[in-house]
């Protein structure tokens, strides 16, 4: 993976970690509506990442 790929992967991981901390913080502060909004919005990119991961995994298995 090249430099741009490593940077992108790191950025996605950092964004995910910050999102989880925001969800935990909003739960601790008692902001239930904001927490639900964060969880619903977080599902969309997470499902897109999972879909791409499983697509690439199938392609790698077929190459072997």
Image (tube, rainbow, N blue to C red):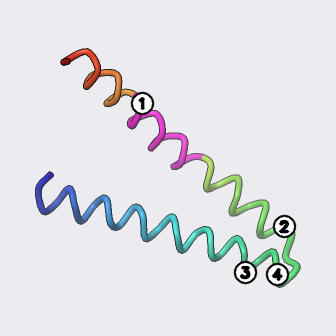
Question: Which residue is disc 1 drawn over?
Answer: 54
Q: Nearer the viewer, mark 3 or mark 2?
A: 3
Q: Which residue appears at 72% of the width and 80% of the height?
A: 25
The vertical placement of 44 against 4, above or below, is above
Of the residues under marks 3 and 2, which one precedes in the sequence? 3
Question: Which residue is disc 4 drawn over?
Answer: 28
Label 1: how many Cα within 10 Å (few below 14, some 14–19, many 20+): few
- CA–CA distance in space, label 3 to label 1: 31 Å
What are the residue bounds of the magenta stretch?
A: 44-54
Q: Are marks 2 and 4 in contact (CB under 8 Å)?
A: no
Residue 43 percent coordinates (x, y)? 62, 48
Residue 33: give its label.
Answer: 2
Q: Is residue 35 left or right of residue 16?
A: right
Of the residues under marks 3 and 1, which one precedes in the sequence? 3
Of the residues under marks 2 and 4, which one precedes in the sequence? 4
Q: Are marks 4 and 3 in contact (CB under 8 Å)?
A: yes
Q: Are marks 3 and 2 in contact (CB under 8 Å)?
A: no
């Amino acid at each position: 993976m090249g430099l741009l790929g490593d940077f992108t992967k790191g950025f996605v991981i950092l964004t995910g970690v910050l999102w989880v901390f925001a969800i935990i913080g909003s739960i601790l502060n008692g902001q239930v509506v904001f927490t639900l909004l964060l969880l619903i919005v977080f599902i969309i990119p997470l499902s897109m990442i999972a879909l791409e991961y499983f697509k690439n995994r199938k392609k790698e298995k077929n190459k072997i």
